[in-house]
Amino acid sequence: MTARRSVASLLNRAIAARCYTDALQHEPGSVLASSGALAVMSGARTGRSPSDKRIVCRDSAPSKAEIAWGSANIPLKPQSFDLARERALSFLDTQAKRKYVVDGFAGADPRHRLKIRVICSRAYHALFMQNMLIRPTEQQLRDFGEPNFTIYNAGERGADPSVEGVNSNTLIAIDFEQKEAVILGTEYAGEMKKGVFTIMHYLMPLKGILSLHSSANEGRKGDVSLFFGLSGTGKTTLSADPNRLLIGDDEHCWSDDGIFNIEGGCYAKAIDLSTEKEPEIFNAIKFGTILENVVLDPDTHVVDFTDRSITENTRVCYPINFIVNAKIPSIGSHPKNIIFLTCDAYGVLPAVSNLSINQAMYHFRAGYTSKIAGTEQGVTKASSTFSACFGAPFLVHKPQLYANMLAKKLQQHPQVRVWLLNTGWTGGPIGSGGERIPLKYSRAIIDAIHSGELDAAMQAHSKVLPLFDLRIPATDLFGVPAEVLDPVDAWRKKGKSKEQYMSALEELKGLFDEVSGNDE
């Protein structure tokens, strides 16, 4: 085994102003945007590289039996990890003055948080993780001590594909026993964020705490809503509500005491961002914010958020306190509403339906949505996919473990209402006459959920759609056309028959049946 090496010589702490100065001077493509945000480039990789993620497998370690090995958790030998770690550290050693350490917390609840240390060579990465981790106070930094987990990000240096278990020049590897992670061959900052989530997704369930790929917000009366969904389904957008406090936009845990955010920041999709559509996110773009892979006017440095020439996956990263109505600390009570967001490319699912516990487990285990262009390397158009627990790439244990924990929570808290909300297509499939459900209708439905209007409407008048037995409102909601609520009506309005609708619905149901009960 390669000898372990001290990291003490690497500890040059980064602050935002220094990160700006270093990025603008030394990192090609970095520009000061007109808003005061730092615009950066992530290089060749503009999305995650899930096929290059590895988990160290040790024969004698408890994690070998606990981890669901497969395409999301590909095993890597300890010797291979040590070679990758040494490769990363040797690169970081060559970076002289431009290497950074970020110490922060994962988990807003002090009883369950982890101390995370990130060591990296790009100022952009240092600022990114300062935004995304929960930032310690000066006293907490002085008392930080040894981290619970360390991430070595040497993404500017490629991995060695001759090492056993490494199949390309990119590697994202996690060793749960040594409490370390290594990133090589990708400068996409989202790998660090999701690396921390993977760590929490492994450790928290072992403590009896349910980790969730979800956003969360809180109403004026303390009512909490959880939003589940993959990138592009609207988690970040729909949870940023001016009438509610934002607990967090992507990663949470549900303990015996309630909900807490894993992160200290937000990482939102920026494509087509506007102050009209998403004012809370748009107004968070200022000094300290990172704009990733966006295109700016060469003279004014104003961002063109509609420009897709670099990637569909343009992003904006900012501390959660940049959202005016963020809740700090990011902790809430047990949820009142759980909302599963799906982006249905078939256009057959209703805009909203109410789920029983059994139906909630069915849809949670399936995690159906459409993969949106840009969120992973090589994805350029929407395609239907199933992602267990609405986050299969980040699950470490078997999906059934998380599903059982959620079912137990729902049984313990019978006041929780579970909803399936389609933010995808209606009136037909994508590319065949269907249209994306407008954001304003999704927002109106969410408002009706929070006000209790939707629940009351469904208690009074509801109907059940075929095959999936989804219960939908049989009366109009304020601001939402009837044909949006009933997909059969939406297809009819587009000149399609009920038989055509049923054919598409049966095709989707067949896909659900294929993945039902699959625990891989």
Image (cartoon, helix red, strand yellow):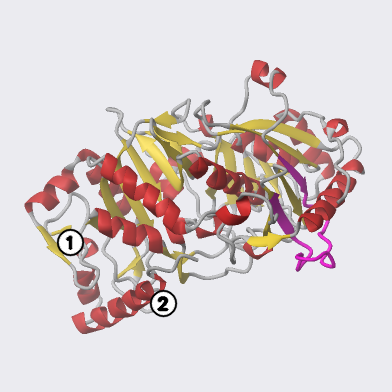
Residue 498's x, y, as percent?
A: 19, 80
Q: Residue at x 88, y 45 (%)?
A: 3
Q: Residue at x 22, y 63 (%)?
A: 470
Is 457 above or below relative to 118?
A: below
Q: Quadrant of residue 497?
A: bottom left
Whether residue 361 is visible here, answered yes or no, is yes
For the residue marked with disc 2, what is the amino acid?
Answer: Gly
Find disc 1 in the rendering and name its residue.
482
Span of residues in magenta: 150-174
Taking the magenta stretch, the answer to whether it contains residue 169 is yes
Residue 29's x, y, as percent?
A: 76, 50
- Specify whether 426 is left or right of 7: left
Q: Within 10 Å of the Cα at label 2, are there few (<14), some (14-19), or many (20+) other Cα atoms?
A: few
Find disc 2 in the rendering and name its residue.
431
Q: Quadrant of residue 433?
A: bottom left
For the residues labelled 1 and 2, the Cα–Cα distance comes to 23 Å
For the residue marked with disc 1, what is the amino acid?
Answer: Ala
Taking the magenta stretch, the answer to whether it contains residue 140 is no
Helix, strand or loop under label 2: loop
Q: Work out whether residue 159 or residue 437 is closer to the camera in this orientation and state it.
A: 159
Helix, strand or loop under label 1: helix
Residue 234's x, y, as percent?
A: 42, 52
